[in-house]
C-alpha cells in the first residue's frame, strides 16, 4: 500500500492525481494533498504567509513544537537547504510583490522555517506517508520544504518535470538527479537536429537580440508606479514633486533601453529604479567578439533553474567569480543580462562584485546571445538553455547546477582548477550528440504536465493526456518504470 502525499495545484494537476488513485485499484491511498482551496492544505498560502484554510483548515493551527523535523536539521545538507528555502521565501517579500508577506529580518525567516518544517514533519508522520509526488520540480518555499522534510523522514519522493522535447516529460527521485544518466546504457534512434542550429524556444523572442528603437514611458508603467504608492506609501500621492521626479527617472530609463524592454510594465518598486539605471549604463558598451572569452548568459531570477537546480550556484556572481579564479591570461568573461530580469537578486552589491573582477565585461541589451555563444571559447551557465544551444552549435558548455543536458557530449561540470584551454579545445561529435539526445528522449515519458503548453496543442485530448500522465506516475511510484534521471539511469 502506498500512502501518498501529492503537491497538486490547479484542476489539471488534481485530475492527474485523482486519475492515478483511481488507476491504482486501491494500491494508492491519498494521505495528504497540497494544493489550493479543495486540497487538504493551501500550499501557496504558506508561501505568502496568509491564513487561508483548505479542507483540513490551516497547517499550523493545531500543532505544537515536537522536534519531528530533527532529521532535517541534522542532515548534512541542512545549510544549503536553509539557504535555498529562505531565498525562495524572499521572492514574495515587499521588495518584489505588492501583496507580500511582512517578513524582513533574517531571524524571522529562520523562525518561520523551523515552525513550518516541524508542522510539516508532524503531518507526514501522523498521516503515515510513504511516497511523495510532485508535478514540477519544487522551487517555491512551501513545496521545497515539503520535499526536503519528506526526504529527511525517509519518504520516497518522485518528481515530474516538463522537458525540451515536445509532448514529453522527465522524471527523477531527487531534484539534483536531473541530468544524471548514462547515454550509453540506452539504445535508441538518434535525435536528429541540423548541426549549427539553435533550438526553437517559445519563451525567447528574436527581437531581444536586436537594438531597435529606444523606448518610451508606457501608461502601464505609470499605473504600476501609482499602484506601488497606493499600497506601499500612500502619503507620497500628495507630494507632486516626488511623483514628478520618479516619473522623470522612469522616463529616462525607458529612453536608454530598447523599446522591447518594458521595465515597469508588470511591477514597480523603488529598488527597480536603481537596477535599471545601473543596467542602462552598459547600453553603449562596445561588443568586441574578436578575443578569447567565456560567455555567461545570466538566468532570469527567481526561477527553478537557479533557486532549485543551482544549489549554491543560484548566486550567479559566485559563478563568475569562480570562473575568474581559473581564467587564463588574456581571456575575458562577457556577461549578458537576461532580457526578462528585474531587480530581484540584482542589487547594487551584485554589480559591485562583478566590477571588482577586471576580466568581466557586461554586454548591452542589443548584443546577440547567438553571436556571443558562437564566438566564445565556451559558454558557462548554472543550468541554462544557452548550454544546450552551444553544444548544438559545436561549442563546449560548462554547467554549475543540475542541467538536464548535463550528460551530453561537450558538457563539462565545473570543478575548481579545470584547464580552460583544454575545455575550449573540446570537439563535439554531432553524431554522438544526436545519439545521446536520442537516448534521453527514449527515457522521457509521453504527456503534457504543464498547463503552459496546452495552447500549443489545440487538439489535445485532455482525458487521454491525464490517463497517460497518471499511469506513468503510478508506475514510477510502484517502481515498475525507471525514472529518466538517477544514479543508475
Image (tube, helix red, strand yellow):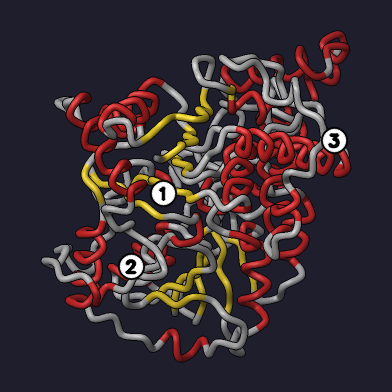
Disc assigned to residue 489: 2
Gap between marks 1 and 2 measured at Cα: 41 Å
Q: Residue furthest top?
A: 238
**Vertical arrangement, residue 156 with respect to residue 411, above or below:** above
**Vertical arrangement, residue 179 with respect to residue 35, above or below:** below
Tell me where residue 472 appears, x and y as whole percent: 26, 43
Q: Kindly tell me whether residue 83 is visible in this rendering.
A: no
Residue at 82% in and 43% down: 110
Disc assigned to residue 210: 1
Q: Secondary structure at mark 1?
A: loop
Q: Earlier in the sequence, mark 1 or mark 2?
A: 1
Crowd around label 3: few <14 · some 14–19 · many ≥20 (10 Å): few
Tell me where residue 48 appears, x and y as whole percent: 68, 26
Left/right placement of residue 121 relative to residue 231 reads: left
Gap between marks 3 and 1 measured at Cα: 39 Å
Tell me where residue 71 appears, x and y as whole percent: 70, 54
Crowd around label 1: few <14 · some 14–19 · many ≥20 (10 Å): some
Q: Earlier in the sequence, mark 3 or mark 1?
A: 3
Disc assigned to residue 245: none
Gap between marks 3 and 2 measured at Cα: 43 Å
Looking at the rendered image, the disc whose residue lies closer to the viewer, 3 or 1, is: 3
Give the residue at mark 3: 104
Residue at 37% in and 35% down: 28
Looking at the rendered image, the disc whose residue lies closer to the viewer, 3 or 2, is: 2
Crowd around label 2: few <14 · some 14–19 · many ≥20 (10 Å): some
Taking depth in this image into account, of 452 and 463 the one nearest to the observer is 463
Taking depth in this image into account, of 457 and 216 the one nearest to the observer is 457
Residue at 68% in and 62% down: 77
Q: Secondary structure at mark 3?
A: loop
Q: Residue furthest left?
A: 189
Residue at 53% in and 28% down: 34
Amino acid at each position: 500500500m502506498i500512502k501518498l502525499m501529492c503537491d497538486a495545484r490547479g484542476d489539471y494537476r488534481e485530475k492527474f492525481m485523482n486519475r492515478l488513485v483511481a488507476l491504482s485499484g486501491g494500491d494508492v491511498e491519498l494521505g495528504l494533498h497540497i494544493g489550493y482551496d479543495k486540497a487538504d492544505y493551501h500550499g501557496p498560502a504558506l508561501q505568502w504567509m496568509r491564513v487561508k484554510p483548505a479542507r483540513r483548515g490551516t497547517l499550523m493551527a493545531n500543532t505544537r513544537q515536537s522536534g519531528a523535523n530533527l532529521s532535517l536539521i541534522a542532515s548534512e545538507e541542512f545549510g544549503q537547504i536553509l539557504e535555498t528555502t529562505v531565498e525562495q521565501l524572499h521572492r514574495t517579500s515587499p521588495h518584489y510583490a505588492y501583496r507580500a508577506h511582512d517578513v524582513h529580518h533574517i531571524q524571522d525567516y529562520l523562525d518561520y522555517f523551523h515552525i513550518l518544517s516541524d508542522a510539516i514533519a508532524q503531518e507526514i508522520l501522523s498521516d503515515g506517508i510513504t511516497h511523495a509526488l510532485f508535478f514540477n520540480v519544487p522551487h517555491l518555499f512551501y513545496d521545497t520544504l515539503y520535499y526536503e522534510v519528506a526526504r529527511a523522514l525517509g519518504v520516497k519522493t518522485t518528481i515530474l518535470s516538463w522537458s525540451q522535447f515536445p509532448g514529453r516529460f522527465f522524471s527523477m527521485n531527487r531534484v539534483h538527479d536531473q541530468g544524471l544518466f548514462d547515454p550509453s546504457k540506452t539504445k535508441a534512434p538518434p535525435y536528429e537536429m541540423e548541426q549549427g542550429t539553435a533550438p526553437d524556444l517559445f519563451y525567447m523572442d528574436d527581437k531581444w537580440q536586436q537594438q531597435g528603437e529606444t523606448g518610451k514611458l508606457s501608461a502601464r508603467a505609470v499605473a504600476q508606479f501609482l499602484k506601488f504608492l497606493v499600497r506601499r506609501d500612500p502619503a507620497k500621492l500628495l507630494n507632486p514633486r516626488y511623483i514628478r521626479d520618479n516619473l522623470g527617472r522612469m522616463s529616462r530609463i525607458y529612453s536608454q533601453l530598447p523599446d522591447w524592454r518594458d521595465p515597469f510594465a508588470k511591477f514597480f518598486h523603488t529598488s527597480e529604479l536603481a537596477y535599471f539605471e545601473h543596467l542602462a549604463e552598459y547600453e553603449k558598451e562596445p561588443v568586441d567578439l574578436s578575443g578569447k572569452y567565456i560567455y555567461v548568459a545570466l538566468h532570469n531570477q527567481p526561477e527553478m533553474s537557479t533557486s532549485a537546480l543551482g544549489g549554491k550556484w543560484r548566486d550567479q556572481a559566485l559563478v563568475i567569480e569562480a570562473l575568474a579564479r581559473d581564467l587564463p591570461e588574456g581571456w575575458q568573461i562577457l556577461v549578458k543580462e537576461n532580457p526578462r530580469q528585474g531587480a530581484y537578486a540584482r542589487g547594487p552589491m551584485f554589480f559591485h562584485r562583478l566590477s571588482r573582477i577586471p576580466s568581466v565585461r557586461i554586454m548591452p541589451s542589443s548584443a546577440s546571445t547567438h553571436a556571443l555563444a558562437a564566438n566564445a571559447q565556451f559558454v558557462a551557465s548554472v543550468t541554462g538553455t544557452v548550454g544546450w544551444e552551444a553544444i548544438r552549435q559545436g561549442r563546449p558548455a560548462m554547467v554549475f547546477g543540475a542541467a538536464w543536458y548535463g550528460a551530453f557530449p561537450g558538457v563539462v561540470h565545473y570543478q575548481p582548477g579545470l584547464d580552460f584551454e583544454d575545455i575550449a579545445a573540446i570537439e563535439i561529435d554531432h553524431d554522438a550528440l544526436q545519439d545521446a539526445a536520442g537516448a534521453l528522449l527514449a527515457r522521457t515519458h509521453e504527456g503534457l504536465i504543464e498547463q503552459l503548453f496546452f495552447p500549443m496543442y489545440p487538439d489535445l485530448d485532455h482525458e487521454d493526456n491525464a490517463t497517460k500522465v497518471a499511469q506513468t506516475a503510478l508506475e514510477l511510484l510502484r517502481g515498475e518504470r525507471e525514472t529518466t534521471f538517477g544514479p543508475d539511469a
